Image (spheres, rainbow, N blue to C red):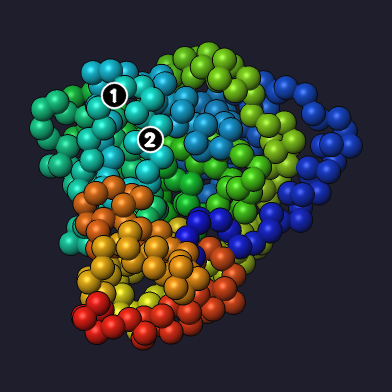
Amino acid sequence: MEVGEPGIETPAAIKQAALRALADGKTFYTHSLGIPELRETVSRHYRDQSDIHISPERIIITNGSSGAFILLFAALLEEGRTLAVSDPGYPCYRNIALLTECTVRPLPVSAETNYEVLPEQLDGSPPPDLLVLANPSNPTGTIYRAGALRALHERLSSWGGVLVVDEIYSSLLYDAPFSSSASLSEDVIVVSGFSKAFAMTGWRLGWMVVPPALVRPIQKLAQNLFIAPPSISQYAALGAFDDADGLARMRDLYRERRDFLLPRLRGLGFDLPVKPDGAFYIYAGIERFRMDSMAFVERALVEAKVAITPGYDFGLFGAASHVRFSYADKIENLVEGCDRLERWLEGIRPCEAG
């Protein structure tokens, strides 16, 4: 219940496409920005799903979404520039950015604002050069509506700042429609990938949509840092968007797991003020148990044999009183994990658990 690893195998059609690519000898370096067929496929995906027309030339295939952030931060950040991130938020943004020696500015978010960064939080001196958001969010599973993102973009644009939106979980929404930030403006950078919705974590394949002026600088970095994305993964992913019914079934499985885990955790005493709309995470308060989150997860691991993630992995704001649950795994494992937690929590002395 800790790692964001889909408990679903890569769909058979994708694996079969990989086998065909191997048989056809597609094992050499590809174009540094990705094979043209895949860039065109991603472009059609935005057109068909969101009615957004994006030139394939603006789409860059990357070595996972992590590879996209390495390239973006190397191109746009340096000492003296500032990256703003939500706190709590995905830790790799700040960890990758630190390689550039930039300043990382955490922006505290809480349940009172649906764990969203507000435009007024961007004010201050110096204003951020980049703001990176995950939509849906990791670790909270909440989503930004189009109006909220538009307000953030307008505030950033007033001083030349850049909005970067990580949409890796955009296909995993359960209660609300999704609108890609690519529709806001050509200068908004969108990062996404195949790992989560397509159960392709080990294939290491992502993409990003960038302004035309950024394509060539990114390409120079990609050629030197990665040479090219993995060839077999690219050819395997060509049909990933074709099985809409299969994607819907996977999304329904995750919804089923969320709808099991939310009430079960509440029944165990966890504080869950915000229902996650997407991704496969639940950010839970543990105030009732009167333990620091690091102590809580260490004891849960040793005494209950259940792995969950401490709030400290995602920042400092409220970190001591929160943990993250992943419901990406099989429902049977979620049931077993909750049963083990229940037995463990019942055995904690009243003075410890409050």
- Furthest-left residue in this view: 124
In x, y percent, where is residue 27? 79, 29
Q: Secondary structure at mark 1?
A: loop
- Residue at screen point 28% across, 40% down: 85
Per the image, the residue denoted by label 1 is 102
In x, y percent, where is residue 105? 22, 35
In x, y percent, where is residue 32? 62, 20
Asked if residue 27 lies left or right of residue 282, the reply is right
Asked if residue 194 lies left or right of residue 150, the reply is right
Q: Give the numbered dot on residue 223.
A: none
In x, y percent, where is residue 305? 50, 71
Q: Quadrant of the C terminus?
A: bottom left
- Residue at screen point 24% across, 49% down: 316
- Residue at screen point 36% across, 50% down: 313
Circle nearer the N terminus (1, 2): 2
**Looking at the image, is 135 positioned above or below residue 31?**
below
- Quadrant housing residue 115: bottom left
Q: Is residue 216 visible?
A: yes
- Residue at screen point 33% across, 81% down: 348
Q: Secondary structure at mark 2?
A: helix
- Quadrant housing residue 287: bottom left
Callout 1–callout 2 Cβ contact below 8 Å: no
Residue 299 or residue 57, whichever sits in front: 299
Per the image, the residue denoted by label 2 is 95
Q: Amino acid at mark 1?
A: Cys
- Quadrant housing residue 299: bottom left
